[in-house]
Image (cartoon, rainbow, N blue to C red):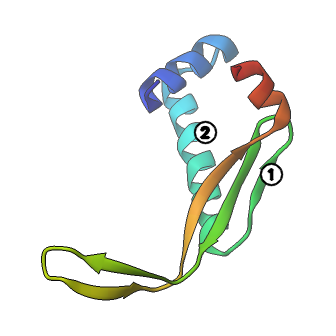
Amino acid sequence: MTKAEVVSEIAKSTGVDKETALVVVESFMESVKDSLVRGENVYLRGFGSFIIKERAEKTARNISKKETIIIPKRRIPAFKPSKLFSVKVK
């Protein structure tokens, strides 16, 4: 499902026009991104959590150059579905 399809579904189910639904969806996504950039997790009860995961530093190999490189630790965004959500998907 694309963002346009999500906007259409929201507009259809709520009765608002697509432009308003698009503004709401984009505002939601921007709020989630801003929170994660600040290091704050976003918890949506019954849906799931948008969280920041820490990836540890690791050693890797570049096979073509036959050299070892170190990949520094980093933070990545992740989504963890709630139990209710996971049960419905099964």
- For the residues labelled 2 and 1, the Cα–Cα distance comes to 18 Å
Left or right of 2? Residue 90 is right
Q: In this view, does 14 lie above or below 50?
A: above
Badge 1, how many Cα within 10 Å: few under 14, some, many 20+?
A: some
Quarter residue 34 falls in: bottom right
Q: Nearer the viewer, mark 2 or mark 1?
A: 1
Q: In this view, does 66 lie above or below 13?
A: below
Q: In which quarter of the image is the C terminus?
A: top right
Quarter residue 70 falls in: bottom left
Query: Which residue is at 13% across, 74% downward?
Result: 64
The residue that label 2 is drawn on is 24
Query: Which residue is at 77% across, 29% downward?
Result: 85
The numbered dot on residue 74 is none
Left or right of 29? Residue 89 is right
Query: What's under tag 2, amino acid-wise?
Result: Val
- Closer to the camera, 51 or 19? 51
- Closer to the camera, 55 or 62? 62
- Disc 2 is placed on an element classified as helix
Badge 2, how many Cα within 10 Å: few under 14, some, many 20+?
A: some
- Disc 1 is placed on an element classified as strand
Query: Which residue is at 80% across, 51% downward?
Result: 43
In primary-sequence order, the first of circles 2 and 1 is: 2
Query: What's under tag 1, amino acid-wise?
Result: Tyr
Q: Where is residue 53 in the image (x, y as percent from the top left)?
A: 64, 67
Q: In this view, does 5 lie above or below 61?
A: above
The residue that label 1 is drawn on is 43
